[in-house]
Image: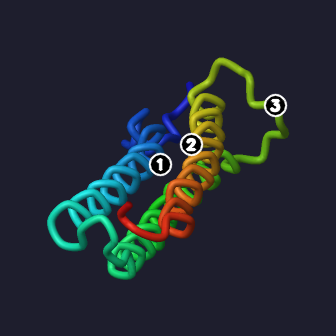
């Protein structure tokens, strides 16, 4: 009889890293849009926006890193060699862990790319 190895995370852990990236993307662009529309004008400085986006990025990368680490831990459970393709709860948990790890890596890259907009845009114009 197989005992359930997976924690109570279920499949929700799969969308955690892309959710963090989406929140970072939204916060970054809303911050820039509100700053330019309400405070800086078309030729205003973006120093404060860049600082805010840098903070958002550090927090997002840390959160994505924690989700990725959790996925890695789930993927590496047990002593059975890869591939983990048996129809068992343990192998399903390892698959979800691997998928979580890969989505976390993709989300980290996407977060960095969306933060690069703050580096290259020089003014609200």
What is the CA distance from the residue labelled 3 to the residue labelled 2?
16 Å
Left or right of 93 in this view: 29: left
The quarter of the displayed image where residue 27 is located: bottom left
The quarter of the displayed image where residue 33 is located: bottom left
- Label 3: which residue? 83
Q: Nearer the viewer, residue 117 or 6?
A: 117
Location of residue 84 with respect to 18 vertically, above or below: above
Q: Percent from the top left, x then y, of residue 103?
A: 58, 42
Q: Nearer the viewer, residue 60 or 72?
A: 60
- Label 1: which residue? 17
Which comes sooner in the sequence, label 1 or label 3? 1
Which comes sooner in the sequence, label 2 or label 1? 1
Q: Nearer the viewer, residue 81 or 35?
A: 35
- Label 2: which residue? 100
What is the CA distance from the residue labelled 2 to the residue labelled 1?
8 Å
Left or right of 28 in this view: 40: left
């Amino acid at each position: 009889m197989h005992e359930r190895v997976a924690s109570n995370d279920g499949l929700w852990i799969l969308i955690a890293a892309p959710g963090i990236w989406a929140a970072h993307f939204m916060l970054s662009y809303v911050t820039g849009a509100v700053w330019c529309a309400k405070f800086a004008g078309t030729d205003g400085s973006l120093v404060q926006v860049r600082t805010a986006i840098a903070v958002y990025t550090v927090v997002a990368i840390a959160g994505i890193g924690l989700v990725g680490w959790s996925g890695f831990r789930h993927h590496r459970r047990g002593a059975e060699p890869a591939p983990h393709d048996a129809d068992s709860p343990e192998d399903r948990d390892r698959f979800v862990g691997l998928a979580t790890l890969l989505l976390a890596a993709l989300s980290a890259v996407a977060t960095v790319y969306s933060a690069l907009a703050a580096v290259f845009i020089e003014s609200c114009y």
